[in-house]
Amino acid sequence: MANNNKSIHGEWSSRFAYILAATGSAVGLGNIWKFPYITGENGGGAFVLVYLACVVAIGIPILIAETMMGRRGRQSPINTLTTLSTEAGANKNWHFLGWMGVIAGILILSYYSVIAGWAIAYVIKAVFGGFSSDAAIVKTSFDDLIASPWQLVFWHSIFMIATMSVVMRGVRGGLEKAVQYLMPALFTLLIILVAYAMTTGEAYFQGLSFLFKPDFSEIDSDAVLIAMGHAFFTLGLGMGAIMVYGSYLPSGISIFKTSLYIAGADTIVALLAGIAIFPLVFANGLEPGSGPGLIFQTLPIAFGNMTGGWLFGVLFFVLLVFAALTSSISLIEPFVAWLVENKGFTRIKASVICGVTTWALGVSVALSFNIWSEFTIFDKTIFNFLDDLTAKWMLPLGGFCIAIYSGWIMQRKHVQSELDMPEQQFVIWKFLISYIAPAAVFLVFLKVLGAF
Ligand code: PHE
């Protein structure tokens, strides 16, 4: 049952290169910007626990499944689904799943890029010594930034240009090498921030107990949906990003083991970010639920206070931008790969088309923080609407379909030969992917939709 398909886009140069790239896709704004603020908005410990349970029981099995499908199909997710469906004797319309992923990728990137733009603005602020140890000044400075349509559009544009220039050069050009240094550096900076958080005394313990002491009265079914959706978002699942990265994965490399490393690294980074941020929130009398601005209103205070804070501040925001960049390229790669395969476009042309589309949508997101803040869709600003639509609904739905597809549609012998893992582990994975993951997503959806 050997898999003879080859990707026309090239392959990762080694197992390590793949782990770095896939970790680059997983670790991003989701871990450092989003995880802390949604944890703050949803009451802390219980939310974190649900999120961790979702990563283990749903996220990791789907991560393995999605990567496996990519490597077996060796094309963009849309074409991979067509190929795999032929192999399995299934309906070719399954490629809709690839299309849904492409759309989700564009929608996510449109707002992801705006937030990454904030991070670039903070690099500049940091360079010019703009961080203060006074929480009120730090907050005003953040409010001023997001009140300015021009600044937001400008930084968003810079980030989109950066994303597209990497994507143009293809998977191996630059990307592999960059991630190799950036990931360890980001990790080190987070450890420094955690060490700083420890100096906040009482607040440090308040922060830890907020994060790790579950109080289930704090969460409702919507919070469970947010936690589950975030498990997909943070691992980069359900829209084809890891599927397309899997399609560049040389045969013979264990998908099971690499997936565990990727999910492990991703979870550790998120928890470290939480441990660094919440003590600062409590030490400065801030609100844990203050929303998307949370890290921008807390971390500068730490940098403003600590010795060497200027350097660390600059480094931290630079690394955050790069972490965002290694994720953003994976968000758009499924569409770029499809345009190259099906329309015969060069990578450059495909990247420009994707970039311009996403950029235009992103402009409306940038304006939704200021001049268009009154404009709502289902009572939500454009930013909130897109974030909810993708992270709460599209990614879990995509993940659900991937679970059904790999658990029920693909032939067991094909799946098994591609995964090539010890029988016992395979049986556990097969059970999780066929029953637990789809049932969990389904039940959470039903509950939130008010079915019971
Ligand atoms: N995982 C990325 C993050 O946490 C975002 C992402 C979502 C990347 C979906 C790819 C696909 O920032």
Image: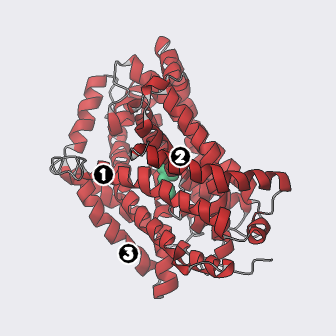
Q: Quadrant of residue 222?
A: top left
Question: Which residue lies under the disc numbered 3?
Answer: 352
Q: Position of residue 372 (x, y in %)?
A: 16, 51
Question: Which residue lies under the disc numbered 2?
Answer: 231
Specify the amino acid type for callout 3: Val
Q: Nearer the viewer, residue 84 or 26?
A: 84
Q: Is residue 422 above or below residue 70?
A: above
**Which element type, helix, strand or loop, lies under badge 2?**
helix
State which mark lies toward you, 1 or 3: 1
* Disc 1 Cβ-to-ligand 1 distance below 8 Å: no
- Quarter holding the N terminus is bottom right
Q: Position of residue 90 (x, y in %)?
A: 62, 78
Neighbor class of circle 1 (other Cα within 10 Å; few <14, some 14-19, many 20+) is some
Answer with left or right where residue 76 lies relative to residue 434.
Answer: left
**Alpha carbons under labels 3 and 2: distance apart:** 30 Å
Question: Which residue lies under the disc numbered 1?
Answer: 385
Residue occupying image coordinates x 47% and y 27%: 44
**Alpha carbons under labels 1 and 3: distance apart:** 26 Å
Specify the amino acid type for callout 1: Phe
Q: Nearer the viewer, residue 66 or 8?
A: 66
**Which element type, helix, strand or loop, lies under badge 1?**
helix
Neighbor class of circle 3 (other Cα within 10 Å; few <14, some 14-19, many 20+) is some
Q: Nearer the viewer, residue 259 or 168?
A: 259
Name of the residue lying farthest toward the bottom: 344
